[in-house]
Amino acid sequence: MAAKIKRDDTVVVIAGREKGKTGKVLRVNTVTNRITVEGVNMVKRHQKQRAMGTPGGIIEKEASLHVSNVMLVNPDTNKAERTRFTFLNDGRKVRVGVKSGRQYD
């Protein structure tokens, strides 16, 4: 199954406590349908010191979100937009914005 959200896309959170925040997608896990967005859903984790250069302590990092809680942002309007898949004449499958018709691939 092709993913509607890919790495380096800009997305906006549409549900949950982080609703309204925007960020760039860092990681996509297609098995669990979860994504990690830069600066969104920050959690604190206790980390042990590993090597000489890595300090221990309480670090803050991004936790994953379910892909259904985010929408792709249209760069022209800076608003969230639903996407669908369309096949081009040369046979390629591309993501297309529902309202704007903009191609994302």
Image (cartoon, helix red, strand yellow):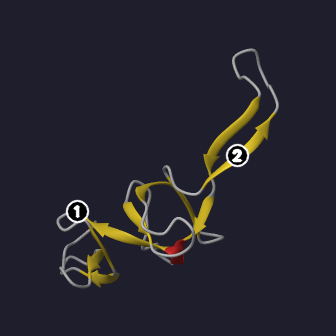
Q: Position of residue 70 (x, y in %)?
A: 46, 71
> Residue at 34% across / 81% down in the picture?
82
Image coordinates for residue 94, horizontal then vertical, percent: 30, 74
Q: Which residue is mark 1?
A: 75
Looking at the picture, how far across and down is residue 1, in whole percent?
51, 78
Q: Which mark is residue 44?
A: 2
Quadrant in which the C terminus appears? bottom left
Residue 9's label in the rendered image is none
Instruction: Report whether 46 appears left or right of 35.
Output: right
Residue drawn at x 42%, y 67% as measured from the top left: 20
Q: Count residues near mark 2 (Cα–Cα under 10 Å), then give few for <14, some for 14-19, many for 20+.
A: few
Relative vertical location of residue 98 with respect to residue 8 in this rendering, above or below: below
Marks 1, 2: nearer the viewer = 2
> Please, what is the three-letter code of the amino acid marked with disc 2?
Lys
Q: Look at the picture and state if 89 lies above or below 16.
A: below
| Neighbourhood count class around disc 1 (C-alpha, 10 Å): few under 14, some 14–19, many 20 upward | few
- Most extreme residue toward the top, as rendered? 52
What residue appears at the point 59 percent right and 66 percent down from the top-left corner? Answer: 65
How many numbered circles are shown?
2
Amino acid type shown at disc 1: Pro
Q: Nearer the viewer, residue 62 or 86?
A: 62
Q: CA distance from mark 1 to mark 2?
A: 31 Å
Dots 1 and 2: beta carbons under 8 Å? no
Q: What residue is rendered at 79% in x and 25% in y?
A: 50
Secondary structure under tag 1 reads loop
**Disc with the residue nearer the chain's start (1 vs 2):** 2
Give coordinates of residue 101: x percent, y percent. 18, 80
Kindly indicate the quadrant of the structure image that contains residue 55.
top right
Secondary structure beneath dot 2 equals strand
